[in-house]
Image: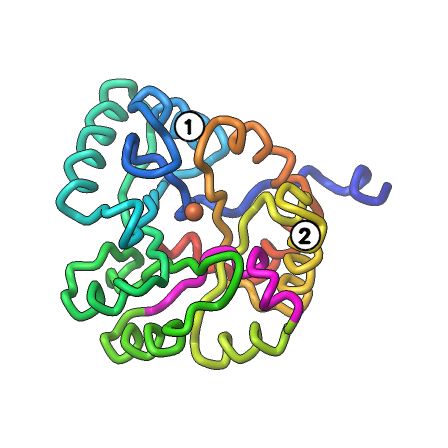
């Protein structure tokens, strides 16, 4: 009830950095038309910049700069043609799998952030991978800043919350999915999202948009009280 009497909430986030808008390379957009439609919606939501993050996995999605950058450039061209006022770039969402250490050693990773040092990583949903700790170590000695995608979705951490604090103590940044607190994924994920926000463990927020169905729920997510609360913290989005 008190929400209604307060002044209208203006979303302070102007940089969106977790989505799957490079068409045809992962489980996100399939065509450039879909990519453009979503970017048009982001413009309407007040985003000035979108950094999209296609999956990179050693088995399913073998993406790299070589195939991502030309597609990013194609989308940029269309944004100009369609007069959509949004700065568009591409990084990646790297799965921590058996092939990831090799990728770190090879360099040439898709990164983002003011110094190109931030790297978005994700974990399998069932168990923490054996090499996660060593991957973090390799990333950090290589000068990268690891950002863990949607920590609230890994229930093996949600059920053992000390793990969240251990990762934060190691310098891992946390990115909350905007749809999580709504209960879009599940009740335990929503509970974990609330925990992370209340503990002030969140550094960035992201939409993890794959398709228009996600975009359609985003306005509701922006009105959610957990989202408003996380926005009171010093988030890094607008510095990217
Ligand atoms: Fe994602």
Q: Quadrant of the C terminus?
A: bottom left
Q: Nearer the viewer, mark 1 or mark 2?
A: 2
Residue 182 got which mark?
A: none
Residue 190's mark? 2
| Percent position of residue 80, x then y | 24, 24
Report the front residue among 161 and 175.
161
Q: Is residue 152 magenta?
A: yes
Mark 2 residue crowding within 10 angstroms, few (<14) / some (14–19) / many (20+): many
Which residue is tagged 1?
38
Where residue 211 appears, x then y in whole percent?
A: 45, 30
Q: In the rendering, at what x and y percent does residue 126 appear? A: 53, 59
How many angstroms separate mark 1 from mark 2 (CA)? 25 Å
Q: Look at the numbered disc 2 and give the secondary structure of its residue.
A: helix
Location of the N terminus (image quadrant): top right
Name the residue nearer the viewer: 230 or 153: 153
Mark 1 residue element: helix
Residue 15: tell me if it is visible: no
Which sits earlier in the primary sequence, circle 1 or circle 2?
A: 1
Residue 58 in the figure: left or right of residue 107? right
Q: Which range of residues does the magenta coloring cover? A: 145-159
């Amino acid at each position: 009830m008190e929400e209604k009497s307060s002044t209208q909430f203006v979303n302070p986030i102007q940089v969106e950095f977790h989505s799957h808008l490079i068409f045809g390379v992962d489980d996100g957009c399939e065509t450039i038309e879909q990519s453009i439609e979503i970017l048009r919606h982001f413009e309407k939501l007040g985003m000035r910049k979108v950094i999209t993050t296609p999956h990179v996995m050693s088995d399913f999605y073998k993406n790299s700069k070589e195939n991502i950058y030309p597609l990013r450039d194609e989308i940029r061209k269309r944004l100009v043609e369609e007069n959509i006022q949004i700065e568009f770039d591409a990084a990646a969402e790297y799965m921590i799998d058996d092939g990831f250490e090799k990728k770190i050693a090879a360099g040439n990773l898709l990164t983002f952030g003011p110094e190109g040092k931030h790297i978005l990583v994700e974990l399998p949903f069932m168990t923490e991978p054996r090499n996660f700790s060593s991957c973090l170590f390799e990333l950090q000695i290589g000068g990268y800043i690891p950002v863990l995608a949607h920590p609230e979705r890994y229930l093996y951490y949600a059920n053992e919350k000390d793990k969240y604090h251990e990762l934060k103590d190691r310098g891992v940044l946390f990115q909350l999915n905007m749809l999580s607190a709504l209960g879009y994924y599940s009740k335990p994920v929503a509970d974990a999202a609330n925990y992370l926000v209340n503990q002030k463990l969140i550094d960035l927020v992201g939409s993890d948009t794959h398709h228009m169905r996600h975009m359609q729920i985003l306005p509701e997510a922006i009105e959610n009280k957990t989202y408003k609360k996380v926005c009171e913290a010093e988030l890094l989005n607008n510095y990217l």
